[in-house]
């Protein structure tokens, strides 16, 4: 039976380096607590990276937060 290489072997990279790269994205915080300005029953207000304040409906905020991904 032909052995199928793992993604790290196929890319020619060492598995440890791929793990380190993955760790950079899995342990990043999508939105830190100090950027949340206020939370009420309907909405969440937070400060963006450029300093502006944005208010979103609670459902929309959670949708964006859960779908947040790091770069490929």
Image (spheres, rainbow, N blue to C red):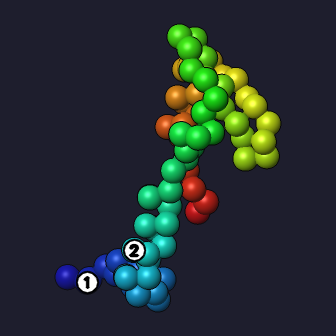
How far from the left and from the top, in percent, is residue 66? 49, 37
Q: Is residue 44 left or right of residue 62?
A: right
Q: With respect to residue 13, does 28 lie above or below? A: above
Which mark, by number, is residue 2? 1
Who's the residue at 54% across and 30% down the image?
63
Q: Residues within 10 Å of mark 2 (few under 14, many from 20)?
A: few
Residue bearing mark 2: 19
Q: Position of residue 40 (x, y in %)?
A: 56, 14
Q: Quadrant of residue 2?
A: bottom left
**C-alpha distance separating marks 2 and 1:** 25 Å
Mark 2, secondary structure of its residue: helix
The x and y percentages for residue 56 are: 66, 23
Q: In the rendered image of this protein, does residue 65 appear above or below residue 49?
A: above
Report the residue at 37% width, 82% height from top: 15
Could you tell me which secondary element the residue under label 1 belongs to? loop
Q: Disc 2 or disc 1, which is closer to the eye?
A: 2
Q: Quadrant of the C terminus?
A: bottom right
| Residue sitting at the far top | 41
Number of marks in the image? Answer: 2
Please report the residue visible at 48 percent of the width from the left and 83 percent of the height from the top.
Answer: 11
Can residue 53 be seen here?
A: yes
């Amino acid at each position: 039976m032909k052995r199928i290489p793992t993604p790290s072997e196929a890319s020619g990279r060492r598995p440890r380096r791929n793990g380190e790269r993955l760790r950079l994205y899995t342990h990043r915080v999508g939105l830190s607590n100090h950027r949340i300005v206020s939370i009420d029953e309907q909405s969440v207000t937070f400060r963006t990276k450029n300093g502006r304040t944005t208010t979103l409906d609670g459902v929309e905020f959670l949708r964006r937060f859960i779908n947040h991904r790091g770069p490929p």
